[in-house]
Amino acid sequence: MEKIKRIHSDFMKFRGNMHNIWEECAYLDEMIRNSEKREFVVVSLHSDSRKTKRIKDAGGMQNKFLSGENTKKHFIDAIGLFESYISWLAQFVFCDYPYRMHSSGMNEEKIFNVILQKETKEEIIECLAEEKVRSVFYGKPSDVFIKDKFDLGIGKTFANNYNKEIELYEEINGRRNAIIHNLGCVDKKYLRENPNTVYKEGQKIIISEQYLRGTIALLEGIAAKTTECVVMNIYKGSIQGKLAQTLKSFERCCESDWYESLLK
């Protein structure tokens, strides 16, 4: 029972933090849009000298912030928070059910070093679990849900019922990777991995307020469905509270193509 309470509690924290990302983005957008443009002082990166920037400079930064920088930052934050939560959930399960790791993602030499360096069985399991999670997210994150790579009791839940939502999730990841690794530009790799994208090669990816909204909503729903599988299929518990509420929203949004309408 305590394990199930812990999972519900951590999901509730995750959900609250995802909502905070959205609300912070909206707040900053409103504040910057309505703020007075004025001169400001910048401290040098390489000394303690200071330089006064002009009102014109402030206006340029305001425009840049409002034309995509604000939403882009919160987009990256939302994906990072989502991956952190799913990673925590997997490690939580692995520590209770180590056999669900099947493999650690490490080579034999690294596993041997872990065994020598750690003092207890629990420390060894925790280290192997961390490596297992890291190896999957560095590969194809959607496999966590389509192929149940973490053996979280998901089975064919997403593969049979939420293919469209996982396709949207894959493009979200593709956009994130392009922003981080390719200065936000679409390349052949992006097009190959996201054949249904609206972008063409060479175009710059822009994260609109609508796209950010859809991203946060979808990631919250996928996390809720994954958590439900863990609670019911592994810990044999029941769903309640914010988790139950989020699951209802997820099903309604899937049925009405809500995510697809936002993530165009």
Image (cartoon, grey):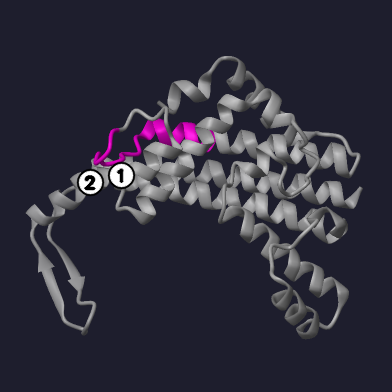
- Identify the residue at image location x=89%, y=44%: 235
Q: Secondary structure at mark 2?
A: loop
Q: Badge 2: how crowded within 10 Å, few (<14), some, or many (20+)?
A: few
Quarter of the figure with residue 246? top right
Which residue range is magenta in the image? 200-217
* Cα separation between marks 2 and 1: 6 Å
Residue 182 percent across, percent down from the top left: 32, 53
Residue type beneath disc 1: Met
Residue 5 percent across, percent down from the top left: 83, 47
Q: Secondary structure at mark 1?
A: helix
Whether 148 is among the magenta residues is no
Tell whether label 1 touches label 2 (CB within 8 Å).
yes
Q: Is residue 248 visible?
A: no
Q: Which residue is mark 2?
A: 35
- Identify the residue at image location x=21%, y=84%: 47
Q: Which residue is mark 1?
A: 31
